[in-house]
Image (cartoon, grey):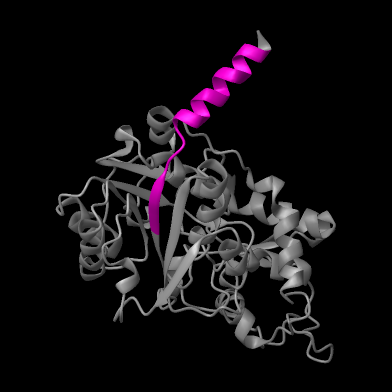
Amino acid sequence: MLFYLICCLCILQVAFSLNGKALIVQNKGGGHGTIGYQLCKTLKQQHPGLQLIILQDKCNYKKAPFSSYKELESAGVKVIETTLSSPGDLSELNGMNIDYVIDNWSKNSENATFVCNIAKNSNAQQYVFISSAGMYKSSNVAPLVETDPVKENDARKVEIAVSSSGIPYTFLRPQYIYGPKSSKRYLDFFIGRAYRKLITPLPLHGDQLVCLTHIEDVSTLVAATLGKDAAKGQVFNCGTDKYISYKGLAKLIHTAIGNDISDMRFMYYEPKDFDKWDGSGVQEFPFRRETFITSPSKAKMLLGWTPSHRIEDHIAADVKEYEELGGFKDKWGVEEVKYDLEIIASKDSSFTFTYPFFDDDTNINKEKRPYPFESS
């Protein structure tokens, strides 16, 4: 009986194996920067007969994940590099039939028109756009589902442009991607402070929930949409169904580093008091003021997909990668903690900016701790 079931599973796997060509239009970094690399690995494993092409926006090949593209090329992935905002000769795509176009680049409707033209000229069967869950409006209801109100931001404008193109489409809205070779490392905010045993600033009370999604779960969901009629004309949240609080995440990182409970100190602030912060700071808090989580139930129900990773199982690996990237050796000064200092100064009028955040042992504030706004 067991042998029969295994044979059935193998037959089903072969039946759903894709052939033809898939084109991944890949950006040069940011939160989605590692999707193209990991998606190629996933598709090569699941669909060995599918030919893969990356149309790569000009990037820094010394940085991850692009520094690992040689692995993909060795596995048969073709990489075409160009400046996507003003592409030169793309004759390599002329006359090529491409079955699936996966757009992990478009930031506006003009970008989308460019990729749509590629899809139309190559007779693509499906256009998959890697959108963003960042378009959801703040809500008192959680988790957010695909029918909840959205802002008409750049990602939403791309969705609108693609949906009006006449090409069968699928939209995926990832949220806070982490994992190996990530271009945007959300956990570094916490790791850097935990390693240096600094107070970690958290918005409000720190019990808000966040949805952190492993890159392999993102890539398996993208793969699960290809060639599926059930995925066409649909929007899917692309995230985990296991959430964690800001404070819980910080404590897990402290534990992974080997810190004592006494080292797990937090200070709380109201982000609205610092409205000049725009999210571009070197060490600005990486998540939203309030709970921001999405539900992947629709993808689980329509596509049979299930996320397989939990953040707590990957903290140690992320800490190790932070160390390998030189994070433990970096010297921190005012630039790295300028927002922390602003929070402290706003609460302590006698604070003289000599708080012991710095690696210079002579620059230490002798005031007693904890401050009244600190907590463990």
Query: Is residue 209 in sight in this rendering?
Result: no
Q: From this view, report whether residue 295 is shown above or below residue 123.
A: above
Relative side of 42 to 155, left or right: right
Query: Is residue 274 in sight in this rendering?
Result: yes
Residue 77, position as x, y percentages in the image:
51, 61
Say which residue appears at 57% left-offset and 68% top-offset.
Answer: 69
- Camera-side residue of 33 and 69: 69
- Camera-side residue of 32 and 78: 78
Total numbered circles: 0
Relative side of 10 to 314, left or right: left
Q: Is residue 5 magenta?
A: yes
Q: Magenta part mainly helix, strand or loop?
A: helix
Magenta region: which residues? 3-23
Q: From this view, report whether residue 60 is shown above or below residue 112.
A: below
Residue 261, position as x, y percentages in the image:
81, 54
Quarter holding the N terminus is: top right
Q: Quadrant of residue 294?
A: top left
Q: Quadrant of residue 343?
A: bottom right
Q: Is residue 359 magenta?
A: no
Q: Quadrant of residue 146?
A: top left
Relative side of 353 to 120, left or right: right
Relative side of 330 to 284, left or right: right
Q: From this view, report whether residue 60 is shown above or below residue 204.
A: below
Residue 235, position as x, y percentages in the image:
31, 43
Q: Residue placed farthest to the top in the image?
A: 1
Say which residue appears at 29% left-offset and 47% top-offset.
Answer: 126
Quarter holding the C terminus is: bottom right
Q: From this view, report whether residue 222 is shown above or below residue 274.
A: above
Residue 75, position as x, y percentages in the image:
59, 58
Q: Residue placed farthest to the bottom in the image?
A: 362
Say which residue appears at 36% left-offset and 66% top-offset.
Answer: 105
